Image (cartoon, grey):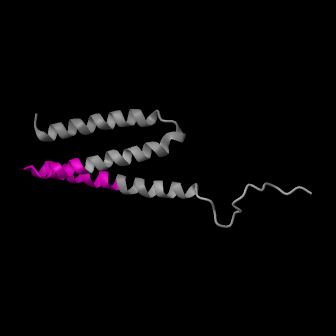
C-alpha cells in the first residue's frame, strides 16, 4: 500500500471515530474535550513535521501541508477559545468580593 493510501485510510478512520466520539459527549464536557483535542492536534503537528523529513511526492507533501495547517489552526483556535472561557470564571472587578447577599431592612 502506498504512503498516500495509508494517509487517506488514517484520515478516514480518524474522522469516523472522532465524529462518533464527539457526537456522544454531553455539552458540559465540551471544554475538557477541547483541551484534549488541542493536545491531539499538537501531536498531529509534530507527526506532520516528522513526515516532512522523509522523501515524499508532491501529492504527499501537499496533503501533509494541509494536515499541518488544519492541526495548527485547531491548536491556536482551541487555546484562544479556552482562554476566553477561563475569563468567564474570573471575578469581575466591579462586583464585591464577599457573599453579602441582598440587604434586609
Read off the magenta span: 46-73
Query: Looking at the picture, how far across and down is residue 57, in whole percent?
Result: 9, 49
Q: In which quarter of the image is the N terminus?
A: top left
> How far across and down, in percent of the image, does residue 19 sit?
38, 36
Q: Which residue is drawn at 58% across and 54% down?
A: 89
Q: Decide which of 1, 98 is in the foreground and name it.
A: 98
**Rendered location of residue 61, percent (x, y):** 15, 52
Q: Is residue 94 magenta?
A: no
Q: Which of 54 and 5 is in front in this view?
A: 54
Residue 37 placement: quadrant: top left
Magenta-colored segment: predominant secondary structure: helix
In the current view of this chain or complex, which residue is farthest to the bottom? 94
Vertical order, 16 against 37 (above or below): above
Residue 68, magenta (yes or no): yes
* Left or right: residue 34 compared with residue 72: right
Left or right placement of residue 80 versus residue 103 in this view: left
Query: What residue lies at 62% left-to-right and 59% top-to-bottom?
Result: 91
Amino acid at each position: 500500500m502506498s504512503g498516500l493510501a495509508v494517509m487517506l485510510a488514517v484520515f478516514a478512520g480518524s474522522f469516523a471515530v472522532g465524529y462518533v466520539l464527539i457526537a456522544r459527549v454531553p455539552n458540559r464536557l465540551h471544554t475538557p474535550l477541547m483541551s484534549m483535542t488541542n493536545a491531539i492536534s499538537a501531536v498531529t503537528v509534530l507527526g506532520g513535521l516528522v513526515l516532512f523529513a522523509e522523501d515524499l511526492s508532491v501529492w504527499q507533501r501537499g496533503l501533509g501541508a494541509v494536515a499541518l495547517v488544519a492541526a495548527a489552526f485547531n491548536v491556536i483556535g482551541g487555546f484562544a477559545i479556552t482562554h476566553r472561557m477561563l475569563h468567564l470564571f474570573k471575578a469581575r472587578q466591579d462586583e464585591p468580593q464577599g457573599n453579602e447577599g441582598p440587604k434586609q431592612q
